[in-house]
């Protein structure tokens, strides 16, 4: 069997909803053995976040839980707490997203866990950190609001708007996975585990990149600009005959190519538009002139013509067309987990040394409890490979 980067790494996954499960799914995709601990009865909250539903849970749950085993433990029950501690003893990594402090009630907080296993990388995901914001529940939507993202998203004269997916959770999940990788490397160097903490608000603030830098440079908070860019023009959606085309011009040479293609070469020498700063200052007039010409053809037609000249542009696709577009470019965005489960999006990293792990469908609630508990009792026992839960259920 092929060697994967995280082969042999055991992850005790006490997380639920999105950010934590996203992080542990990445680890599973990279070959780790992920044991998802769920509450008996309903399990991960998102198993009931539908519609849409699958035969066994929800599309939401399935999007971030492939490649894992599921066990149910009632952490309020002393016997199950003991099982959780046995799992901690065997694990390399623990991931949890309880509200900070909650796990102490069950004897599963960091201090207790490191007594049991000093090599453990104990990863906590919270909404707002473990200090003054520890008691605050953290959902992506609220963090998009208080973290500034909504204030810079949407039309200039429209209401604040969220991004169309729980992107803060995804960013936080990726930060968690990165933190885990670094802590495992540190453990390789020192032999010591540690407590890795990430939170939704900090991951969002850290991802505001140039917009945050604009604030810090000028003291003025950036505002919503629709699809426009605060510092580059044209870098926005432009109206064609039938639809919008996103056009991104990053330097003057690219602008000259664009004006050539549109038969507007005079604009490239016009003092109002010759440099990026001038184009930003005279953006409304620039867009008016560009749209005058773009309006004569369809967005698809312009996409083909402009891409041919090396200009960054593309139609505004729905998600189905987005997948087809990726496939038309030779990418392999999708993977079939088998077992009758719906197709999934593949982990987006390619390695030259090995293929991506084979993907297995998300687990049924508690499907692995018996086997994992017996594995915890017997250090010589191997876990059997995950097979398709659906065909065996
Ligand atoms: C996700 C949460 C908002 C959920 O809020 P709550 O349901 O109020 O949180 P809690 O974690 O405290 O869990 C609720 C209760 O269930 C109990 N609980 C949970 N699992 C178990 C098991 N296995 N056994 C026994 N008891 C359990 C837990 O101890 C609490 O008990 P009592 O204390 O006795 O009630 C919060 O956990 C949180 O802020 N997490 C950190 C940030 C995060 O990951 N957010 C999710 C992003 S997803 C998202 O935003 C999106 O998808 O959109």
Image (cartoon, rainbow, N blue to C red):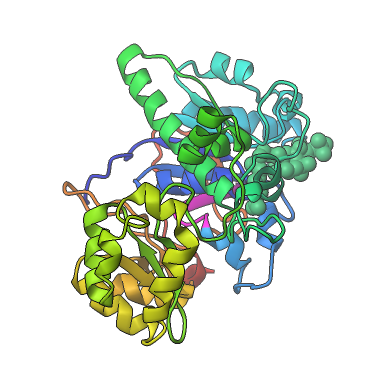
Ligand 1 image position (quadrant): top right
Give the residue drawn at x 55%, y 51%. Answer: 167
Q: Judge left or right: residue 251 versus residue 109.
A: left
Which of these two is toward me, 282 or 218? 282
Quadrant location of the C terminus?
A: bottom right
Bounds of the magenta segment: 64-72
Q: Quadrant of residue 3?
A: top left
The answer to whether residue 67 is magenta is yes
Q: Position of residue 171 (x, y in %)?
A: 51, 44
Hey, which quadrant is residue 373 in on the image? top right
**Position above or below: 20 against 41:** above
Residue at x 47%, y 38% (from the top left corner):
209
User: From where the camera sits, is residue 210 visible?
Assistant: yes
Front-most of residues 291 and 383: 291
Q: Residue at x 47, y 72 (%)?
A: 319
Image-quadrant location for residue 269? bottom left
């Amino acid at each position: 069997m092929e060697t994967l980067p995280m082969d042999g790494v055991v992850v005790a996954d006490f997380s639920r909803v999105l950010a934590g499960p996203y992080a542990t799914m990445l680890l599973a995709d990279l070959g780790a053995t992920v044991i998802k601990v769920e509450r008996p009865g309903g399990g991960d909250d998102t198993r009931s976040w539908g519609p849409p539903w699958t035969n066994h849970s929800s599309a939401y749950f399935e999007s971030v839980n492939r490649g894992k085993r599921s066990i149910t433990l009632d952490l309020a029950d002393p016997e199950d707490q003991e099982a959780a501690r046995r799992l901690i003893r065997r694990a390399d990594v623990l991931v949890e997203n309880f509200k900070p402090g909650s796990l102490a009630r069950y004897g599963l907080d960091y201090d207790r866990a490191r007594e049991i296993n000093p090599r453990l990388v104990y990863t906590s995901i919270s909404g707002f950190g473990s200090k003054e914001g520890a008691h605050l529940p953290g959902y992506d939507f609220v963090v998009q609001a208080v973290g500034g993202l909504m204030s810079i998203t949407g039309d200039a004269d429209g209401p604040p708007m969220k991004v169309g997916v729980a992107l803060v959770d995804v960013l936080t999940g990726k930060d968690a996975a990165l933190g885990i990788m670094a802590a495992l490397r540190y453990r390789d160097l020192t032999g010591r585990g540690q407590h890795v903490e990430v939170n939704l608000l900090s991951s969002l603030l850290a991802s505001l990149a140039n917009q945050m830098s604009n604030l810090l440079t000028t003291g003025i908070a950036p505002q919503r600009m629709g699809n426009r860019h605060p510092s580059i023009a044209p870098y926005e959606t432009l109206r064609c005959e039938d639809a919008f085309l996103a056009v991104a011009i990053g330097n003057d040479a690219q602008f000259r190519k664009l004006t050539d293609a549109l038969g507007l070469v005079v604009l490239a020498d016009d003092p109002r538009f010759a440099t990026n700063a001038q184009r930003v200052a005279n953006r409304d007039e620039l867009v008016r002139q560009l749209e005058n010409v773009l309006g004569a053809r369809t967005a698809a037609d312009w996409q083909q013509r402009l891409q041919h000249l090396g200009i960054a542009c593309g139609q505004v696709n729905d998600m189905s067309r987005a997948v087809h577009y990726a496939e038309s470019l030779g990418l392999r965005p999708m993977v079939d987990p088998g077992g009758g489960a719906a197709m999934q999006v593949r982990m987006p990293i390619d390695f030259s040394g090995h293929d991506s792990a084979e993907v297995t469908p998300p687990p049924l609630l508690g499907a692995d409890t018996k086997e994992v508990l017996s594995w915890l009792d017997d250090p010589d026992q191997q876990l059997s490979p995950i097979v398709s839960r659906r065909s065996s259920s």
